[in-house]
Amino acid sequence: MVLSTGYNKVKTAVFISGTGSNLKSLIKFSKNRISPISIDYIISNNSKAKGLNFAKKYKIKKKVLNFKNKQLSENKLLSIFKKNNVKMICLAGFMKILSKNFIKKFEGKILNIHPSLLPKYKGLYTYQRALNNKEKYSGCTVHFVNSKLDSGKIILQKKVKVAKNDTVNSLAKKILIQEHKLYPKAILKIFNL
């Protein structure tokens, strides 16, 4: 990772589309003395995303862009990030695909958390697909984002045992608990901490 922390935490934007439970765990982590990042922006494509409430609660700037015109939305973000020295992006349940051009500008500095053991089950409906295939294990992966969906270099993974009676909801809950632990660990790993 080319980001050096010194004593200043690396300014980070978290992109969400929903409840923001991974965002919440990243905010808590960022408040920790050992954390190399600070959460300075919450970005969402969904004005009704529950996760936006954390912006008010933790006094973090937020920006909602609908991404109907992807280029326009991304250019706005690039300009905000440049002005505010945001150096890193964490995708946490963000349901839009970023353009190659945007990813290139933040190459090696965009992370994503995905609810499967990549390279298995890229994209959506990961829990259902794991259950349909009678997988013994599922889990979650933190990886760097590149221009191919869920295909960037893997940073860390956590296996979760799939029980015979698991449903989509019960498996999702089990995996989410691990996601909240894995994302901070992956960030520490890329900063060699």
Image: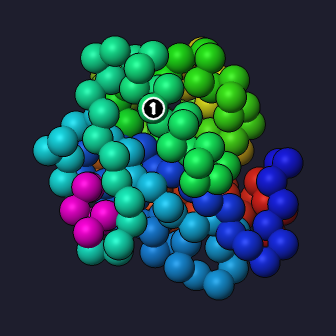
Q: Badge 1: how crowded within 10 Å, few (<14), some, or many (20+)?
A: few
Residue at 35 percent of width and 74 percent of height: 58
Residue at 27 percent of width and 74 percent of height: 57
Q: Residue 118 in the image: x percent, y percent? A: 58, 30
Residue 131 seen in the figure: no
Give the residue number, with chain letter if any, for mark 1: 76
Reply above or below: 143 against 28. Answer: above
Left or right placement of residue 4 versus residue 150 in this view: right
Secondary structure found at label 1? helix
Q: How is the image coloured?
A: rainbow
Considering the whole magenta stretch, tell me its main secondary structure.
helix
Q: Residue 48 in the image: x percent, y percent? A: 14, 44
Q: Residue 140 in the image: x percent, y percent? A: 50, 44
Q: How many marks?
A: 1
Residue 115 included in the magenta stretch of the image = no
Left or right placement of residue 111 versus residue 51 in this view: right
Which contiguous range is marked in magenta? 51-56
Q: In front here: 67 or 156?
A: 67
Residue at 26 percent of width and 55 percent of height: 51
Residue 55 included in the magenta stretch of the image = yes
Amino acid bearing label 1: Lys
Residue at 32 percent of width and 58 percent of height: 21
Query: What is the quadrant of residue 190 in the picture?
Result: bottom right
Left or right placement of residue 58 versus residue 34 in this view: left
Q: Residue 145 in the image: x percent, y percent? A: 62, 30
